[in-house]
Amino acid sequence: MAAEEISRQADAAGLAALISRASAENNGKKRGLPPVEQWNPPFCGDIDMEIRADGTWFYMGTPIGRPALVRLFSTVLRRDEDQKTYLVTPVEKVGIRVVDAPFIAVEMSVTVRKGRQVLTFRTNVGDVVEAGGEHRLRFATAGDNAELKPYLHVRGRLEALVSRAVMYELVALGEILDVEGQATFAIRSAGEVFPVMPADELDALSQ
């Protein structure tokens, strides 16, 4: 037990150091994001950190209860070509586990700009993202009941899973459109069309 406690304290100290370096690299500024895509530090192994499907962050099996700490970690998060997710600073890269998506879209606003519908989302870590050409919406199905799961591109290779409550608001905005010659249930935002599913599949679900 003593050895386990020493190990836990060492891990916590290392995590605190990582936080400090990430914060320093951001120069204490609240605005802007560190240029994690430009950094190429050595891989320093995995740490016992996990982002659960509901967006809750855990460290060594315990929820991280400080929202400011979660937001800080989220700014140095990166998903690489190997499809793994890392916390990245200029001097080190450590792997973490992500059950589904690293972020959750918890709020959506609908506005009209130049006659076009624009959907803007807020994530659980404070990102504000407008769905459009640079930030695509994609729709997947999962589970035996083919549950619809919308995702929003946030930055890099990182996505936000649209929460169930927001998903209902989103789907309510859907319409049947012609997409590449096929009648498709789709969502519009900022002049872009995001297909959800073929219209005949939607009809089958409604029966």
Image (cartoon, rainbow, N blue to C red):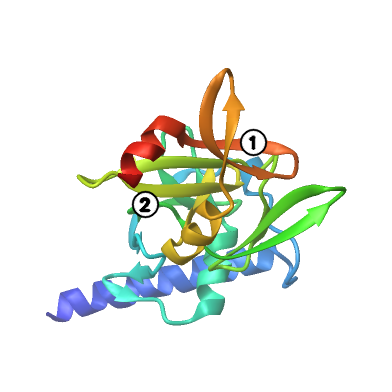
Residue at left offset 37%, top offset 53%: 98
Secondary structure beneath disc 1? strand
Report the Cα–Cα distance between label 1 and label 2: 24 Å
Q: Which residue bears the numbered disc 2? A: 100
> Closest to the observer: 70 or 22?
70
Indicate the quadrant containing the C terminus: top left, top right, bottom left or bottom right.
top left
Q: Is residue 60 left or right of residue 111?
A: left
Q: Position of residue 105 (x, y in %)?
A: 53, 61
**What number is the disc on residue 113?**
none
**What number is the disc on residue 193?**
1
- Give the amino acid type for the residue marked by disc 2 in the picture: Asp
Secondary structure beneath disc 2? loop
Residue at left offset 40%, top offset 49%: 149
Residue 83 lies in quadrant: top left
Circles 1 and 2: CB distance less than 8 Å?
A: no
Q: Position of residue 50 (x, y in %)?
A: 34, 61
- Give the amino acid type for the residue marked by disc 1 in the picture: Val
